[in-house]
Amino acid sequence: MGIRRAIFEHIDPPVNWIHIDQPSEQELDSRLGSLNIRLPLQDSGQTRAAFHRYPHFFYLRVFKLDPSGLDHAELEAIAIHLIVTNTSMLSWSMDSKVTEDFEDIQRKLQAHPELVQSSNHLAFYVVDDLLEATFPFFDEFNDRIARIEHQTLHDSHDARIKEEIFRLKRLTMQVKRILGSQRDVAYQLARYWSAIPSMDTVYSFELYDHVIRLSDTADTYREMMDTILDIYLSSVSNRLNEIVKTLTIVTALFMPASVIAALYGMNFRVIPGAENPWGFYLVIGTVVAISAILLWIFRRRKWI
């Protein structure tokens, strides 16, 4: 467990930010108790963002999408929790993967403390940076889509492509569900902050605009996955048609041989050419000639 502090003393009253990495239940209860907060805010595997407003503080749960989760069957969404009062902000996460993100945010805000004019401004910049971290996830997702699209066009007979397409479609739906909940939370925050005089309108609705753009990006990728699936199914169908066409042509080329063999296989006493020493070669020549004529017709009509 790691604890990082940042104090913005240029504000009256000063704002104190405490971030805890992977806190134990006892540590989290102690920190909440120091803020006179008694709420069951433990992470219970929720996959939806949340905003709860109380008389003297609000609770916020948002998610960061981890690009490394694209290799798994289920999307890896990291929950980040924030409790914001008038003079402090407590944040924590049960996953150590966001440690570097919070370190970067603290360094940026401490280098430019004038950005923070209140605890609400601090919460805005933290959530905004966490949302910005979603774009690397989409960059990696776009690379996966480009790769699977190339494989679909050039190697459609590989069964693993179908599995990868459906896996990415499931991930897209999970991303859409998470971003949908964060869009609702951003809208609630916009309405909440728009009533606070110290929060300008641009701050109130900028987060909502960011989530809308991310949600639109997820919709675009979902449509791309639907298109890739259609291309894959069309490629499989076209390949099946090519196989059927090839087999049909081969059957047509050998049909004269089958007919002639069937005629000469009948049990009659008199069969034309049966006593001719060149009869066998004449029959074979006839078969080859008819097959060659059929092959010429097929090529002339551009069937093959």
Image (cartoon, rainbow, N blue to C red):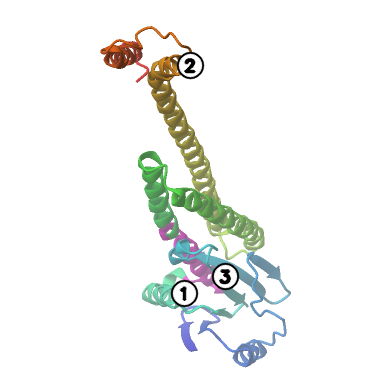
* Distance from Cα at disc 3 to Cα at disc 2: 97 Å
| Dot in front, 3 or 2 | 2
For the point 48% across and 71% down, the residue is: 116
First of labels 2, 1 by sequence position: 1
Q: Position of residue 219 (x, y in %)?
A: 54, 46
Answer with left or right where residue 205 lies relative to residue 42: left
* Distance from Cα at disc 2 to Cα at disc 1: 84 Å
Q: Position of residue 145 (x, y in %)?
A: 42, 49
First of labels 3, 1 by sequence position: 1
- Label 3 secondary element: helix
For the point 43% across and 25% down, the residue is: 245
| Dot in front, 3 or 1 | 1
Amino acid type assigned to the residue bearing label 3 in the image: Asn
For the point 62% across and 70% down, the residue is: 60
Categorize mark 3 by other alpha carbons within 10 Å: few (<14), some (14-19), many (20+).
many
- In terms of secondary structure, what is the magenta stretch mainly? helix
Amino acid type assigned to the residue bearing label 2 in the image: Met
Q: Which residue is mark 2?
A: 266
Q: Which quadrant, please, contains the C terminus?
A: top left
Residue 120 has which mark?
3
Q: Is residue 209 visible?
A: no
